[in-house]
Image (cartoon, grey):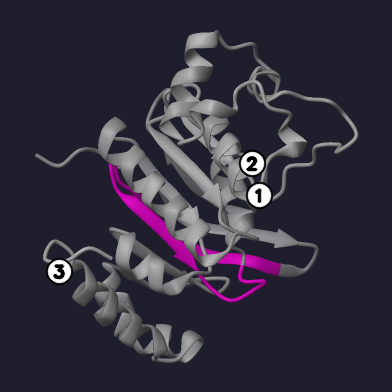
Amino acid sequence: MSELPLIRTQSLQVMRGSQRILDNVTFNVNACEITTIVGPNGSGKSTLLKAIIGSVPLNQGSIERLPNLRIGYLPQTVNIDPTMPLSVRRLLSLPVKVSVQEAEEALTAAGVADCADAQFTELSGGQRQRVLLARSLLRSPQLVILDEPTQGLDQPGSAAFYRQIDDIRSKSGCAVLMVSHELHVVMASSDHVICLNGHVCCAGRPEQVATAPEYRALFGSGTQGALALYRHEHSHHHHHDH
């Protein structure tokens, strides 16, 4: 039985002045899947996410969402005044108040259960990202949308963040749509990859995309090795501890 896609975009076009930011973009986001958008800088990735949540108008095309689809969104930048005292729990209750229990569940899911009473601005970069991830999980979303969620994190921090997302997906069954520049992680942990450069250059399962000429033209073939290495490590990781 195949479920209906959560989101179906058809021939999207977004203009900024006379410039086409997105042109003829068509793809589906399926339930329970991790779909990752990759592409060079300026390829329209953030714009595409904003179009999907409805904060950027379309010039052409359509976006169909499953009726009453609950979406959690973690934008690329969150402007929080560093001089303003703001506890994590208070941040989670902006703009809509949430119960202590809801806040606790979301923080636990995001791996920062012990941060509820901390000042947001005193947290490490990785903790902040997880608190913002928790914020996007508050309404038990069916789809979580993340824009470059590991920007500014070091390699271990970013690997841990992606593991957390995978964990959330397996426990709650939500779908994930994210933009990422970390190609080796994307290739290893996504169900579906969309390579975007104003238009969809190629899309499909990671192994299909990794071998597509359009993908190699944008990123070279270096990630192919990373993919093989990742698969190799993960097929053996139950034999020995790292």
Mark 1 is surrounded, within 10 Å at the Cα level, by few (under 14), some (14 to 19) or many (20 or more) other residues, namely: some
Q: In which quarter of the image is residue 10?
A: bottom left
Of the residues under marks 3 and 1, which one precedes in the sequence? Answer: 1
Q: Which mark is residue 128?
A: 2
Few, some or many residues within 10 Å of mark 3 (<14, 14–19, 20+): few
Q: Can see residue 6?
A: no
- Residue 16: numbered disc: none
Mark 2 or 3, nearer chain start: 2
Tell me where the magenta segment starts and ends, as one range.
Answer: 20-43
Out of 22 and 221, give the one closest to the viewer: 221
| Quarter of the view holding residue 154 | bottom right
Residue nearer the viewer, 14 or 87 = 87
Identify residue for label 3. Answer: 235
Mark 2 packing: few (<14 Cα in 10 Å), some, or many (20+)?
Answer: some
Residue picked out by circle 1: 125
Q: Which amino acid does label 1 sit on?
A: Gly
Residue located 39% across and 91% down the image: 221
Q: Is 189 rendered above or below residue 90?
A: below
Q: Where is residue 205 in the image (x, y as percent from the top left)?
A: 26, 67
Q: What residue type is labelled 3?
A: Ser
x, y percentage for residue 24? 50, 65
Percent x, y for residue 15? 70, 61
Residue 130 in the image: above or below residue 15:
above
Query: What SS does tag 1 mark?
Result: helix
The amino acid beneath tag 2 is Arg
